[in-house]
Image: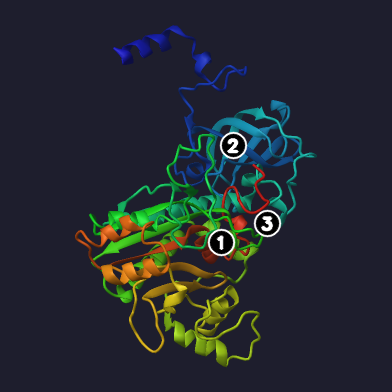
Amino acid sequence: MLIRALTLFRRAVPASRFCPCATGRTQQYCTSAKNISIRDALTSLDTGSNIRIRGWVRSVRSQKNHLFLHVSDGSSLQPLQVIANSDLNIRGLTFGCAVDITGSLEKSPSQKQKVELQAQRVEVVGECDPVDFPFKIKERHSLEYIRQFPHLRCRTNSFGSLLRIRSEAAAAIHSYFRDNGFVQIHTPIITSNDCEGAGELFQVEVKNPHFFSVPAYLTVSGQLHLEVMAGAFPAVYTFGPTFRAENSQSRRHLAEFYMAEAEISFIESLEDLMKVMEDLFKTSTEHLLSQCAEDMGLFHKFISPGQRVRHDTLSIISYTEAIDILSRNSEQFTFKTEWGCDLQTEHEKFLVKHCGNVPVFVTDYPYDLKPFYARDNQDQPRHTAAAVDLLVPGVGELCGGSLREERLELLKTRLARAGLEDTYAWYLQLRQFGSVPHGGFGMGFERYLQCVLGVKNIKDTIPFARSSRSCLL
């Protein structure tokens, strides 16, 4: 009945009401022109077809009888060339304006593109004053410059490429976990737990002081909640926003960022945990190199020339070996390099360079450096924990993980020493009812993008950067 009603409606209304080629802004439909993305138009073999594209003008060039436009809709780095007759008399057609174009897709005589659109109709949907527009048609703007315009920077080639890569990278991470039997868990954003014990949390304030029975914060990690789920599933993961209230304006810090975190049951060695970390890193990177070659190429050619990530080879050293390497070198570090110190960014980057500029696993950190949940190696004379970090070129630490302490008495002792036994009574219960050896890790998503793209400032890897004194939207 619905199909018949629509058919009768179309017969009753003049065809011009449905055709975008007809005059007037109210004409919004067309039975002959196919709506298509510019990415699909550029790869189409169906030349001669009547299509409709909508996007933004990247360049306008006028000749005696024709206008040559480059139009982009965000679906690809390359724009589509549109050729329109000058007598169309299109008002407001400038760089940056939004357009709705219908025409015939034809094979291009130029070597620069395979196809072009012979326009039958060009409508300016949204005008743009190129004088006031902060991005100029023939200028290549730096990431530092476009960072001043968080509401407009998605319209630049570089940030458009970043957002497409980011979207594809997120899909690759989800695909890896799904294909390897992980169950996705949506862990809470509001929580009472300080997972890492650093104290850099955003506290949630509410008008009703009794709304929460305990102080509530924005999460710094979903790990503890994943450990809960690891009591019922062999492999779980979460991928979502996390928050750190660190008062820093450096190029390494964000107040809001994304983490991919995993927890695996019945795992008893760091080697098994590192295998998952390595596979996630390699699989995601290979996916980007194959699916986002053009966008990745823009970064590797113009933004970080020569900085291509090596993901085929990874090194493994212990923390003790790392300290020996740092202590023997002649470079002067700002921070000390003795056994028991925490590795700083300058140390991590040096170790990566020392190992051939490939990703490096550093294992078995001093026990006192790691949170209460890291498994005690019970080794002497240097007391270590079964913890591991993955260091990568240009960034330093990308992933951090550990085997979790599943032995109830050892965990009780450590929590009691820290005065946290009552706070984490529920966590102790996890070890009382069907506990198994398990471990997990977290990977900073924006740091991953920095690594594979060679981007120096982490604020250039996220749609809207949130950091200390930087929240413009």
Q: Residues within 10 Å of mark 1 (few under 14, many from 20)?
A: some
Relative horizontal placement of residue 89, taking residue 105 as reference (left or right): right
Q: CA distance from mark 2 to mark 1?
A: 23 Å
The amino acid marked with disc number 1 is Gly
Res. 237 visible in picture? no
Residue at image coords 61%, 51%: 465
> Secondary structure under badge 1?
helix
Q: CA distance from mark 2 to mark 3?
A: 23 Å
Q: In the image, residue 463 lies at what x, y percent?
A: 57, 48
Sequence-earlier tag: 3 or 1 = 3
> Secondary structure under badge 3?
helix
| Residue marked by disc 1 | 297
Sequence-earlier tag: 2 or 1 = 2
- The residue closer to the viewer here, 277 or 337, is 337
| Residue marked by disc 2 | 55
Q: Exactly how many numbered labels are in the figure?
A: 3
Residue 143 got which mark? 3
Residue at image coords 41%, 86%: 382
Q: CA distance from mark 3 to mark 1?
A: 16 Å
The amino acid marked with disc number 2 is Gly
The amino acid marked with disc number 3 is Leu
Q: In the image, residue 309 lies at what x, y percent?
A: 51, 70
Res. 271 visible in picture? yes
Q: In the image, residue 120 lies at what x, y percent?
A: 60, 28
Q: Considering only vertical position in the picture, is 291 above or below 3?
A: below
Relative horizontal placement of residue 144, taking residue 380 as reference (left or right): right
Residue at image coords 50%, 82%: 340
**Image quadrant containing the C terminus:** top right
Q: Quadrant of residue 285?
A: bottom left
